[in-house]
């Protein structure tokens, strides 16, 4: 889909074509195209059917808004899930409204609420507009830029479709041209794809990492979206790194500057937050229960904090499984009851599962080189019962735990 085809989608005729295409979503693609071609030319037919398919896919991220919004394939893939964007927008408002604290390098205090103008945010790499929508809905005015004219047109159309055009402006520009010092907040979501696909190297982001760092250095308060696996050495000194998990899956990391440092993990949709306290989990033997911390806590190096919550210890100090003797409900870890523990042996494991008449297993591993699918085949499972198998190390020795799940966390 090019800019001309997208522009036509915004006309009354294009909107009719899109509505008809949405009614054909799920039908045979050739039949749908043939039906559409009876009324519309090839370019509009293709654009409408593509957009209808993207809207259907976007419901998982944008809910009901997806039915009004516009997308590009790449823009949808990189866009932020609504719940995550709303969480960040709330944090932006909270940080702006927080009183200045002694020792902070930047004074952020705003006027009293009744005198306060809408916070001004510059979105340096807006994409199709998922984050600017959340920021505008939170009460901010947003000046957004992107280098791609089609992406800018899509973001602008989304702001208009959702009734936010009076709070949002979108222009074609390079992020390096942004002047973050003229705004209350800088938001940036650098592209993390190259011509060869997704990249995990911040130096290959677009805009490049040095440009990103320069923007952060000039911003009063900044929120930078990065990949969850960002190497720790790339986190700027004094920044707070926050890892966000949505329904048990780590979605992304956010770097905050101008509001204090440290490490933080957040669980959505519940809004639970855990911050680094410096506590170190003790090492110790396995217990009646095994806890598996949420991935956001693991990424944020908060396993010690989770262990403290459940009164636990680490059977192996290098592996993020927690052993404990008591059952403690926490959103920060899934809990399993340990039924058996022994040094790993395929023969012994197969016999133990046969004795329990286990025909279905969930296999988890940390610190183990065993191929899970090959092991599943080698176990030759048979029976009506289920179990959780955990492959790990205990005191640096390859071990296996047979467990049953007690809670999703």
Image (spheres, rainbow, N blue to C red):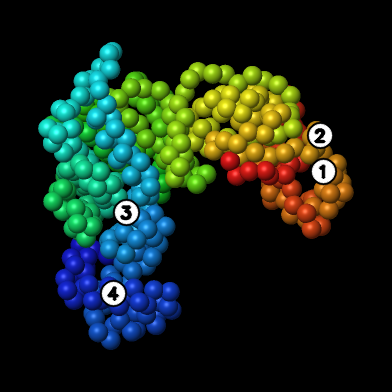
Residue pointed to by mark 1: 349
Residue named by callout 3? 75
**Is 288 located above or below residue 1 in the figure?**
above
Q: Secondary structure at mark 3?
A: helix
Is residue 152 found left or right of 316 in the rendered image? left
In the picture, residue 312 is in which quadrant? top right
Can residue 246 be seen here? The reply is yes
Q: Are marks 1 and 2 in contact (CB under 8 Å)?
A: yes
**Could you give the CA–CA distance between mark 3 and mark 2, rounded to whole angstroms?**
48 Å
At 32% across and 75% down in the image, what residue appears? Answer: 21
Q: Residue 54 location, x and y as percent?
A: 35, 63
Residue 213, position as x, y percentages in the image: 28, 28
Q: CA distance from mark 3 to mark 4?
A: 21 Å
The numbered mark at residue 88 is none
Whether residue 180 can be seen here:
no
- The residue lying at 14 percent from left, 34 percent from top is 114
Quadrant containing the C terminus is top right
Quadrant assignment, res 189: top left
Alpha carbon separation for disc pair 3 and 1: 47 Å
Height in image: 110 above or below 378?
A: above
User: In the rendered structure, which disc, 2 or 4, sits on the residue that comes first in sequence?
Assistant: 4
| Quarter-of-image position of residue 29 | bottom left
Decide which of tag 3 and tag 2 comes sooner along the chain.
Answer: 3
Label 1 neighbour load within 10 Å: few <14, some 14-19, many 20+: many
Query: Pointer 4: what residue?
Result: 19
Left or right: where 218 falls relative to 245: left
């Amino acid at each position: 889909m090019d800019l001309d085809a997208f522009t036509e989608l915004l006309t009354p005729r294009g909107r009719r074509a899109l509505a008809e295409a949405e009614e054909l979503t799920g039908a045979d693609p050739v039949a749908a195209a043939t039906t559409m071609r009876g009324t519309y030319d090839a370019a509009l037919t293709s654009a409408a059917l593509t957009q209808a398919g993207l809207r259907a896919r976007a419901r998982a991220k944008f809910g009901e808004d997806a039915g009004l919004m516009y997308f590009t394939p790449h823009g949808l893939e990189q866009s932020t899930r609504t719940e995550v964007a709303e969480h960040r927008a709330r944090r932006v408002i909270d940080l702006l409204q927080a009183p200045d604290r002694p020792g902070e390098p930047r004074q952020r205090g705003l006027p009293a609420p009744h005198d306060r103008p809408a916070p001004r945010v510059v979105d340096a790499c807006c994409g199709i507009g998922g984050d600017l929508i959340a920021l505008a809905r939170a009460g901010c005015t947003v000046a957004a830029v992107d280098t791609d004219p089609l992406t800018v047109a899509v973001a602008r159309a989304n702001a208009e479709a959702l009734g936010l055009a009076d709070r949002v402006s979108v222009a074609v520009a390079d992020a390096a041209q942004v002047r973050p010092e003229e705004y209350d907040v800088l938001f940036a979501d650098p592209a993390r794809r190259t011509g060869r696909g997704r990249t995990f190297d911040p130096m290959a982001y677009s805009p490049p990492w040095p440009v990103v760092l320069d923007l952060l250095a000039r911003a009063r308060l900044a929120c930078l979206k990065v990949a969850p696996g960002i190497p720790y050495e790339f986190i700027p000194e004094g920044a707070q790194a926050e890892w966000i998990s949505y329904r048990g899956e780590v979605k992304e990391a956010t770097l905050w500057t101008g509001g204090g440092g440290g490490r933080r993990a957040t669980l959505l949709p519940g809004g639970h937050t855990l911050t680094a306290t410096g506590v170190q989990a003790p090492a110790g033997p396995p217990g009646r229960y095994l806890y598996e911390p949420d991935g956001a806590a693991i990424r944020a190096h908060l396993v010690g904090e989770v262990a403290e919550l459940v009164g636990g210890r680490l059977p192996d100090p290098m592996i993020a499984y927690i052993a404990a003797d008591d059952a403690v409900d926490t959103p920060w870890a899934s809990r399993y009851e340990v039924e058996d523990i022994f040094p790993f042996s395929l023969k012994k494991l197969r016999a133990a599962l046969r004795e329990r008449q286990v025909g279905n297993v969930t296999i988890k591993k940390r610190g183990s080189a065993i191929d899970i699918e090959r092991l599943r085949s080698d176990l030759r499972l048979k029976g009506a019962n289920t179990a959780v198998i955990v492959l790990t190390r205990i005191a640096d020795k390859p071990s296996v735990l047979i467990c049953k799940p007690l809670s999703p966390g």
